[in-house]
Image (spheres, grey):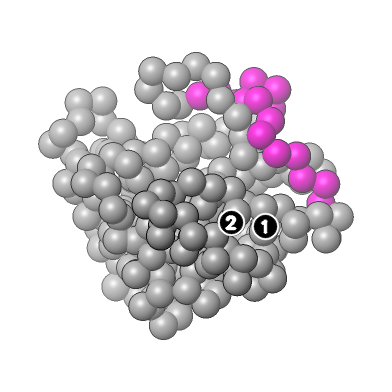
Amino acid sequence: MHLHTLKRRVAEGLASHGPLIEAHIRAVTGAGGFGGIEGVFAEAVLNAHKLHGEGPETERPLNAVGLSQEYEGREAGRLDCFLPSSRTGIEYKAVRMPRSKPSPEYDAGQLLADYRRLNNPEVLRHAYMVVFVWGPLADDTKSAGGLYRAFHNQMFVDCRLARPLKSNGIYEGPEVQRLGWQEAWALATPPSHAAAVRKGSVGAVIFSVV
């Protein structure tokens, strides 16, 4: 599945499930939690895939697809979404912006590990990270391009802050360079390897890995 097609699927999912997603976020955060936020976003996109006959498979074991775990200290793992017809792998993550946890490792580190996991062109024809964005930043941005710029710059700050804290180089490896998080982003248009969607008070940033 090409990037522009996945962008349409994400946009369709957020448009059709936006009120449900926003209501879930209000309910769980109002109770002091964050449970199920990624799942309600992913379900919206899953339904969009199904409507177009994509036949998505969810939570496939990594070794069943031919991928390996890249989180330090873990061996097993699952791929969030796999589209067999196009050999497309997708990892989802929901991020509150600005982040509510103090450590930059919470978002940047996980995303970079996902990138490493998906970066296997011998196994996948296409691979993407879909980052669902919610919180004040998503609510305040006026366009999809503005959402991308704000998200990118937060990742740039997180990676810069985390570099002195890590010895394994995950924040300074080729993934940071490919994503462009080694420098700030000033343009309103995402680069060619990325796309952004904004619907209501939520949005998504999509990164092509393969």
Identify which residue is drawn at 67% across, 42% down: 81
- At a point 40% along the width and 74% down the height, the residue shown is 139
For the residues marked 2 and 1, what is the alpha-carbon distance in whole angstroms? 7 Å
Q: Is residue 42 above or below residue 201?
A: above
In this image, 97 relative to 123: left or right? left
Image-quadrant location for residue 168: top left
Asked whether residue 64 is drawn in magenta, I would say yes
Mark 2 nearby-residue class (10 Å; few <14, some 14–19, many ≥20): many
- Give the magenta-colored segment's residue range: 54-69
Residue carrying label 1: 45
The answer to whether residue 13 is magenta is: no
Say what secondary structure mark 1 lies in.
Answer: helix
Question: Are the residues tagged 2 and 1 within 8 Å (C-beta)?
Answer: yes
Q: What type is the residue that disc 1 sits on?
A: Val
Of 71 and 106, which appears nearest the observer? Answer: 106
Tag on residue 41?
A: 2
